[in-house]
Image (spheres, coloured by chain):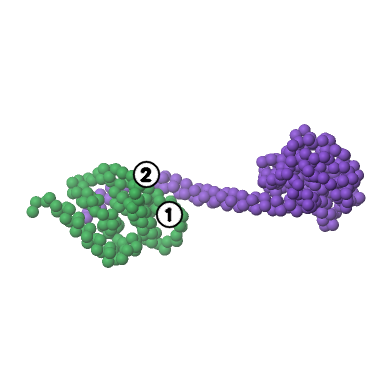
Chain colours: A purple, B green
Amino acid sequence: MKPYKSYMDSVTPPPALRDKIKKGLYYSTNTVALSWVAAAVFVFVIFGAGWMFVHADLLRTHYDLGTPHMLAGEAEKCPQITLQPAYLLEYPMIFSAANLWSVTVNIELEAEPLTPAQINSLFPNLPAFVGEPQRGEVHFKDEYVIDRIRVNYPNFSIFVQANPLYAVDVSLYTPTYIHGVRVTAFADVETDRAIGIGGTSLGAIFERDDLRFLLRYTLTDTDILQGETALEEIREAAIRFTQVVTALIYHQYIKGFTK
Amino acid sequence: MDEIITRNLHALYRTAAAIMRNKEDAEDIVQDVFIKLHEKNPLFASHTHEKAWLLRVAVNLCRSRLRSPWRRQHVPLLESFPAKNEDERELMQAVFALPAKYRTVIHLHYYEGYTTTEIAEITVQKESTIRQQLTRARRLLKADLLEGEPV
């Protein structure tokens, strides 16, 4: 077998093979890294999508426990309520949990406004809304009476959102998106202060196209709230506030509502 | 890694070339062997152990590639590396005409100098099988080389 050995001795790898091997090793290493990245992104997307769907359902529950709770016995009169995730599309500037908790609610709105007396009788135990509109057509007086809301759209929309910068607990705000108009309720917990608009308030901003108005809800008579008690108070107030705001609009404009 | 490549590059390349019968596949196999080494990163007791491990991987990769239905046609090794004389050319033609399993044992035994026991370890087969393959390979080679010669 000497000729075999002699021939195989002449079979030598090309000089470029060494570079090819090193390139192979390089790409192999990076492929592994990229695979991990791809796997991580895949898992994130899958779990993220699942999370959003799960919480969309939770939101439905929250909403059902929120406004309809205030409207006991009246919800069936609402001609159309549809809930769907809004996610980030409507509010791209703020990538936050609050956006993910948003839902879209479309409500037919062709009803006579409530009178202050009607509203007062609906929510006898609520603290008063105070403040003045920043801009727009809404006025709140003492005892949370709405003078008027000049919004005559076939589909009225509200967005109730916990501002991520000032969120107390987004899940407690019943964050709701009703197409077209945003209502932003906010409070500051970093300083244990409800700063909505002023030192002791929770706030809500209603927005739609050129219409923008602001609601203020005073928590207590004190200027500064501190500690756990304040936080709890803010939370409770935030829930009630959101419910009231939503319920007021709901009552005010839902077709067929009569008190 | 550089040292391992330097130590084993030629042996791996020749083994792969002997089994695959073309240099393109041989280059790919050698590259894949070192990628496997990089991925597995095994600990070797000696250079002998290291070479045997690499050859085992090379032989396995050759087997897989030979089984693949997607194999491309390549330039035969004898055209890429022409024989120096007629005897050499005839022998190599006879060797390359053998089935892959016989080419493998011929190369590992006659070129790399492994015993049948060592080849059995490298190819993960019984030693008796290797001995049998070697005997049959020799017999086939002899028949091929004697064919056409004047009696």
Asked whether the residues under marks 1 and 2 belong to the same chain, the reply is no
The location of residue B7, given as percent across then percent down, is 38, 54
Q: Is residue A50 left or right of residue A191?
A: left
The type of residue carrying mark 2 is: Pro
Decide: is B130 above or below A29: below
For mark 2, name the chain: A
Relative to B74, A191 lies left or right:
right
- In this image, B88 relative to A31: left or right? left
**Considering depth in this image, is A228 or B43 the residue closer to the camera?**
A228
Disc 1 vs disc 2: Cβ atoms closer than 8 Å?
Answer: no
Front residue of B98/A209: it is A209
**Cα distance between the residues tagged 1 and 2:** 21 Å
Residue at (44% x, 47% y) in the render: A24
The residue depicted at 27 percent of the width and 66 percent of the height is B128
Query: Helix, strand or loop at disc 2?
Result: loop
Q: Secondary structure at mark 1?
A: helix
* Dot 2 crowding, Cα within 10 Å, few <14, some 14–19, many 20+: few
Residue A125 position within the rendered picture, expressed as x and y whole percent measured from the top left: 88, 52
- Residue A152 can be seen in this image: yes
Disc 1: which residue: B36
Residue at the disc numbered 2: A15
Locate the N terminus of chain A by quadrant: bottom left
Query: Looking at the rendering, which quadrant does residue B52 occupy?
Result: bottom left
